[in-house]
Amino acid sequence: MTLSSIVIMIAILCYLGLMLVIGIRFSKTNTSTDDFYLGGRKLGPLVTAMSAEASDMSSWLLMGLPGVAYLTGVCDAAWTAIGLALGTWLNWFFVSKKIRRYSQQIHAITLPDFFSKRYHDKNMLNCIAAIIIVIFFIPYTASGFAACGKLFSTLFQVDYMAAMIICAVIIVAYTALGGFLAASTTDLIQSIVMTIALITVVFYSGHIAGGFDAVLENAKSLPGYLSLTHTYDPVMGVSKPYGLITTFSLLAWGLGYFGMPHVLLRFMAIEDEDKLTVSRRIASVWVVISMAVAIFIGICGLGVSKAGAIETLTGSDSETIIVKIADILSRHNVLTALLAGIILAGIMAATMSTADSQLLAASSSVSQNLLRDTFGINLSDRASLIAARITVLAISAIGIFLARDPASNVFNIVSFAWAGFGATFGPVVLCALFWKRSNKYGAFVSMLSGGIMIFVWKYLVRPLGGAWDIYELLPAFLIAMALNIIVSLLTEKPDSSIEREFEAARFK
């Protein structure tokens, strides 16, 4: 092992050690499930903003987005980023304060719990929402474990399974010990590490590519590479038109935010709803800048290949562009190797910040919403806390099992899971918060139809191609929203107590 590899490993191990210390520290503050799952609603505006966005972005920000830009140019990456940026802002502006106030008013500590108490439904909504979370989050968590394992095994030529299990154990340890506060605090740190990684890579890659002028000149020489209406075909070396349907399909990614349990929980957990305005500004600015930088890194990366510093990357290998650039950086001296270690820790941070939040949301669905609420198993606060931690361990074990094969297609489930949450929960959240006439029957049919349509569109309709080749989130979301409205209007209106609660939860 070279000196640079040793320094990189030390940097990453120090980072992982810090995550464990945070988990141990916050384990002493958890005395109830409310503390474990919502941190006692004590989050400050900075932690709320950055933990929400760090848990949302995952390794897609440092691997997927630069990789897409590297291969096909600005169009694909930019329209996806624009959709996500709009979705982020709209979610913070319209949903955050409302769900914070409403959830506190009805004493809801998880998203299924919120649906159940919002509509005064004891079991039906709680149960189906919890099952949906488990269905989509367990493989999502597994993909996070796999990403960490692949990073370690690639960097240090160690066994993938061993590397993946070590990373999973660390994520599980600080999540099971510290709960929501540990996950949120580590997410804040992880967002800082991700930011350092983005800034360092964009400037260093521009330098080794011969300067930003050379980067842009190279990009301009490729047909359609810098266009928002055309995309670059790296195989044929030609420009291809970008249809309006494809553009709307990518913009539809933003709809997913309205149904993301781990993001909505951050809104519910802030200490003061008035501070959500500050959080919104911080989150929106960070998201826009970080995604823009990530896209530019892909463009710079192509310039680095053009300059001969790294080989030309094809297919999924393009997602390793930041890893390749960090490897070049690490060869200069000990300090640059340390900086490369921070960059690679940033990739791990992006993955871990999502995995811990998903793990916590999935465990809350099992221990709180299924065991306690649906099946009526009465537990003391201490017993509930133990059950929550055992659930984290059990779900993690399943995640490790699913991620055991490094060649598995677990990663393909990520965009599918995003669509799943957006279509099943998004329409229900919006109707629950903004439409007094919505009822439990509309919410139930909405969740069920959204989930079914995700599978139908993905595997039966979208393969037809042409105008049907639309990201499954958009049609499933629209159908679920329409059915929520239709069924609510065709069935009995909510009783007066539900309407009074709704009126009390209005914005100031």
Image (spheres, helix red, strand yellow):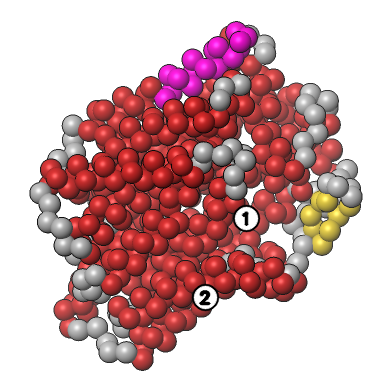
Looking at numbered disc 2 in the image, what kind of residue is underneath it?
A: Leu
Q: Which residues are magenta?
A: 1-16
- Image position, residue 60 (x, y; %): 57, 44
Q: Residue at x 86, y 55 (%)?
A: 239
Q: Which residue is mark 1?
A: 80
Res. 91 in view:
no
483 vs 313: above or below: below
Badge 1 local density, few (<14 within 10 Å), some, or many (20+)? many
Indicate yes or no whether the magenta region holds residue 218. Answer: no
Q: Position of residue 45 (x, y in %)?
A: 33, 44
Q: Is residue 297 left or right of residue 378?
A: right
Where residue 42 appears, as percent x and y from the top left, is: 23, 44
Q: Which mark is residue 98?
A: none
Question: In the image, what residue occupies the spot 10% across and 49% down?
Answer: 380
With 277 as the anchor, is 496 left or right in this view?
left
Residue 347 drawn at (x, y percent) = 54, 33
* Residue corresponding to mark 2: 478
- Viewer-nearest residue: 249 or 398: 398
| In this view, 317 is above or below 495 | above
Q: Which part of the image, by quadrant, shows the N terminus?
A: top right
